[in-house]
Image: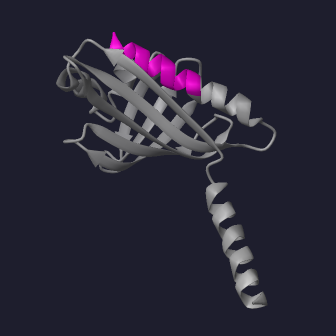
């Protein structure tokens, strides 16, 4: 009996450590009158973010188009790695490799889905705040990035 309880406690600790790798979740949805194909033509270019996100001044691809380096308009650089690409499902998933943002363990997906004759842009992510930053402060930053980008795409 004690072995079962110890195993269960150990399993719970392992599960909790896996869950805590992503303590914060963000998601934003913007609705566009443009078709999925039209919005995906912008989003589907992994480095196209330099053309539609208001905070990005420029985007450069490297390592077989799997790494993008974003130069921000306010200064700073974010390096992101493409993890999964679904052209048919109109989505891709990426993670941040290097960033001045107060987050870590960040992984995100952006997708475009049909909504009547238009489309929805859905941007979601999971991450943790770095030491010295509250979860609320980190979430506010990521929520703002998603909102600004998705709203710009929806126009």
Q: Do we see residue 69 in this rendering?
A: yes
x and y percent of residue 141 in the render?
63, 26
Q: Please, which residue is most extreme toward the front here?
A: 1
13 w.r.t. 152: above or below: below
83 w.r.t. 6: above or below: above
Q: Find residue 10 and report its image quarter.
A: bottom right
Asked whether, in this view, residue 118 is left or right of residue 109, the answer is left
Q: Do we see residue 55 in this rendering?
A: no
Q: What residue lies at 72% left-to-right and 29% top-to-bottom?
A: 137
Q: What residue lies at 34% left-to-right and 50% top-to-bottom?
A: 84
5 w.r.t. 112: above or below: below
x and y percent of residue 112 in the render?
30, 30
Q: What residue lies at 67% left-to-right and 54% top-to-bottom?
A: 20
Asked whether, in this view, residue 11 is left or right of residue 78, the answer is right
Asked whether, in this view, residue 24 is left or right of residue 34, the answer is right
Say which of 53 and 120 sits in front.
Answer: 120
Give, as a single range, the part of the protein colored magenta.
Answer: 143-155
Q: What residue lies at 81% left-to-right and 39% top-to-bottom?
A: 132
Q: Is residue 134 magenta?
A: no
Quarter of the figure with the N terminus: bottom right
> Which secondary structure is most common in the magenta stretch?
helix
Q: Find residue 13 and report its image quarter.
A: bottom right
Q: Please, which residue is most extreme toward the right here?
A: 132
Asked whether, in this view, residue 41 is left or right of residue 74, the answer is left
Say which of 97 and 33 sits in front.
Answer: 33
């Amino acid at each position: 009996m004690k072995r079962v309880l110890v195993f269960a406690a150990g399993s719970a600790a392992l599960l909790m450590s896996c869950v805590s790798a992503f303590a914060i979740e963000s998601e934003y949805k913007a609705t566009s009158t443009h078709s999925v194909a039209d919005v995906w033509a912008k989003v589907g270019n992994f480095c196209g973010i330099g053309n539609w996100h208001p905070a990005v001044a420029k985007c450069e691809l490297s390592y077989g188009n799997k790494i993008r380096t974003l130069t921000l308009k306010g200064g700073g650089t974010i390096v992101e790695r493409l993890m999964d690409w679904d052209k048919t499902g109109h989505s891709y998933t990426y993670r941040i490799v290097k960033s001045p943002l107060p987050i870590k363990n960040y992984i995100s997906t952006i997708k475009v889905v049909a909504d009547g004759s238009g489309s929805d842009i859905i941007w979601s992510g999971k991450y943790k705040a770095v030491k010295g930053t509250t979860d609320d402060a980190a979430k506010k930053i990521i929520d703002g990035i998603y909102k600004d980008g998705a709203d710009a795409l929806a126009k």
